[in-house]
Image (tube, grey):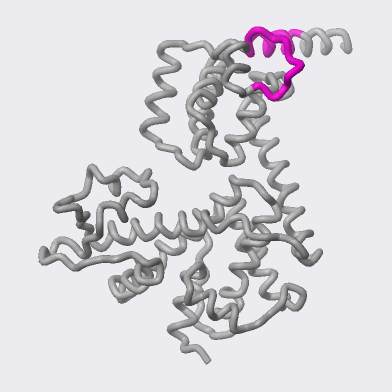
């Protein structure tokens, strides 16, 4: 039997070895999962998909166990969907409730240190009372930091050690947890019960419909989505699903979208989906593109970069192809009238 404290820790930090041990001890097969566990797993996956916060405050042992068992099942559902954007959204959701629990606990420092130990993070306790812990510089830099207050330039560093107050340490743990969950996805999905496959397919269909809706809304009154050249549509789709694009692909997409009159806020909303997104850097680059009125690279350069998915395309410039398609669509509408 596990104590209530152990179950609470495992429920709040379900990616830890402590949680995995509890799951293994239950010795459940996927074919015999209790329905409440499946329902909680589906709820986790849907919250991640919609970008909603997932916080479940509970102290009953049976409900805690359901949550602990639901986490690996939710990872299976997300993995069946197979979209990198959902992997990151799920990981971000988990890191969000990790930070919520870390910052709301009565014994915040004790819980943070327990989680750090589970994650294999070595810390020391500095003499300065203004800092909670210090950790090696290489460990601090082991995860990408996009949040300005947590960036290295804003930390006190001495003798290869980074000194953090409790709040900064909690934020570091949040990022560490995000990367830990993200690196564990996708999980193997062979032999998965049809019940879980059905949930995943519904989520996948909802994801496609949502992206199509967002795509149409972004260009409402400006352009028909089907007018996009294949290269641009491919880049847009990859970025919208949370994939990291090479620098020149980002530049090509941003310059194209700016050239067709897409508002900056819509361009920024798209680039926020990138796993390496930086608000300040992206805003500066989009502003610079708009100010200088940069044109997208020619089709010859796009082919040279390997970004053209249609080897049969003979277009010379993506904007020319786009405008030709728009004229064709307009002429077709006039004929139909």
Residue shown at the point (49%, 54%) measured from the top left = 92
In the image, residue 181 sits, relative to residue 72, either above or below, namely above
Residue shown at the point (57%, 13%) measured from the top left = 301
Residue shown at the point (52%, 55%) measured from the top left = 183
Question: Can you give x and y, in whole percent of width and height, for residue 331 in the image?
Answer: 80, 7
Question: Can you give x and y, in whole percent of width and height, for residue 279 in the image?
Answer: 40, 36
In the image, residue 202 sits, relative to residue 114, either above or below, namely above
Q: Is residue 18 left or right of residue 160?
A: right
Question: Can you give x and y, in whole percent of width and height, for residue 298 in the image?
Answer: 58, 10
Residue shown at the point (64%, 13%) measured from the top left = 318
> Which image quarter is the C terminus in?
top right
Q: Which image quadrant for residue 242?
A: top right
Q: Which image quadrant for residue 37?
A: bottom right
Query: Which residue occupies the foreground of this view, 8 or 307?
Result: 307
Q: Which image quadrant for residue 161?
A: bottom left
Q: Is residue 139 left or right of residue 267?
A: left
Range of magenta residues: 308-327
Query: Which residue occupies the foreground of this view, 191 or 206?
Result: 191
In the image, residue 131 sits, relative to residue 57, either above or below, namely above
Inspect the magenta stretch and tell me whether residue 321 lies in it.
yes
Inspect the magenta stretch and tell me whether residue 334 lies in it.
no
């Amino acid at each position: 039997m596990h104590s209530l404290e152990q179950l609470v820790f495992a429920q709040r930090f379900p990616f830890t070895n402590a949680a995995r041990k509890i799951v293994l001890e239950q010795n459940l097969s996927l074919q015999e999962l209790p329905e409440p566990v499946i329902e909680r797993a589906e709820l986790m996956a849907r919250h991640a998909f919609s970008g909603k916060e997932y916080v479940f405050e509970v102290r009953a042992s049976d409900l805690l166990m359901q949550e602990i068992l639901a986490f690996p099942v939710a990872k299976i559902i997300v993995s069946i969907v197979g979209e990198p954007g959902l992997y990151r959204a799920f990981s971000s959701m988990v890191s969000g409730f990790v930070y919520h629990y870390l910052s709301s606990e009565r014994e915040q420092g004790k819980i943070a240190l327990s989680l750090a130990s589970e994650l294999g993070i070595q810390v020391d306790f500095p003499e300065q009372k203004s800092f909670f812990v210090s950790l090696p510089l290489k460990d601090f830099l082991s995860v990408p930091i996009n949040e300005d207050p947590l960036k290295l330039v804003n930390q006190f560093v001495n003798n290869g050690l980074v000194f953090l107050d409790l709040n900064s340490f909690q934020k570091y743990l949040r990022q560490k947890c995000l990367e830990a969950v993200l690196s564990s996805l996708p999980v193997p999905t062979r032999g998965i019960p049809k019940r879980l496959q059905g949930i995943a397919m519904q989520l996948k269909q909802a994801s496609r419909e949502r992206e199509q809706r967002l795509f149409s809304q972004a260009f409402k009154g400006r352009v028909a989505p089907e007018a996009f050249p294949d290269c641009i549509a491919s880049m847009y789709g990859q970025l919208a699903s949370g994939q990291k694009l090479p620098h020149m692909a980002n530049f090509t997409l941003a310059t194209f979208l700016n050239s067709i009159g897409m508002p900056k806020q819509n361009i920024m909303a798209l680039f926020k989906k990138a796993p390496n997104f930086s608000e300040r850097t992206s805003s500066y680059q989009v502003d610079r593109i708009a100010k200088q009125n940069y044109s997208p690279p020619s089709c010859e350069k796009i082919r040279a970069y390997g970004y053209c998915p249609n080897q049969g395309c003979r277009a010379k410039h993506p904007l020319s192809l786009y405008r030709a398609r728009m004229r064709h669509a307009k002429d077709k509408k006039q004929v139909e009238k």
